[in-house]
Image (spheres, rainbow, N blue to C red):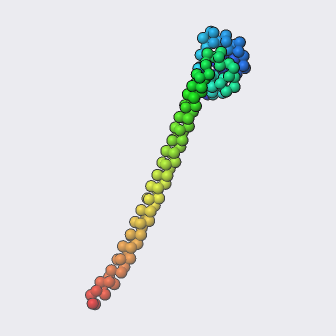
Amino acid sequence: QDQWSPLSLAVWYNNPDCVSLLMAAGANPRCGSIYGRPIVEWAADRQPHLLPLLNLAPEKKETAKSDVIKADVRDDVNKQMQELRMEHQIQINNIRQEMGTMKQGYEARIVQLEATVQIYEPIFNQIEATQ
């Protein structure tokens, strides 16, 4: 989500004078974004010459960038976990449905076998009686 600020516009338009004035006035380079990316990350990738004006040393730039990457990775992992949970829940539901169908099939087969036993039971009884 974009949070354009005067500072993000100055960085976007590559205006070092405006960046300097805004920073002198107390602008926070960690607030705002450019096309959903933090100002610091955008500047690190596209306008690295503005980083000294943003009061960020190169090592801080890397830390800020790595923090953003860590957050992105965490978001990706959370999204993948949600997708896996949904897939597994669908699989569990499908297995339960299959088991229910199989159970119904077995119950129907039992009923058939019981009916067959009832048909043949008198015959078996007669055979036993004659022996």
Q: Residue furthest bottom?
A: 130
Q: Is residue 29 left or right of residue 129?
A: right
Quadrant into which the N terminus falls: top right
Snapshot quadrant of residue 22: top right
- Point out residue 121 in the picture as x, y percentages from the top left corner: 33, 80
Residue drawn at (51%, 41%) of the image:
81
The vertical placement of 109 against 63, above or below, is below
Snapshot quadrant of residue 54: top right
Q: Is residue 43 left or right of residue 114?
A: right
- Point out residue 61 in the picture as x, y percentages from the top left corner: 60, 23
The vertical placement of 92 against 48, above or below, is below
Residue drawn at (55%, 31%) of the image:
71
The vertical placement of 23 against 79, above or below, is above
Whether residue 9 appears in this view of the structure is no
Residue drawn at (49%, 54%) of the image:
94
Residue drawn at (57%, 33%) of the image:
72
- Point out residue 73 in the picture as x, y percentages from the top left corner: 56, 35
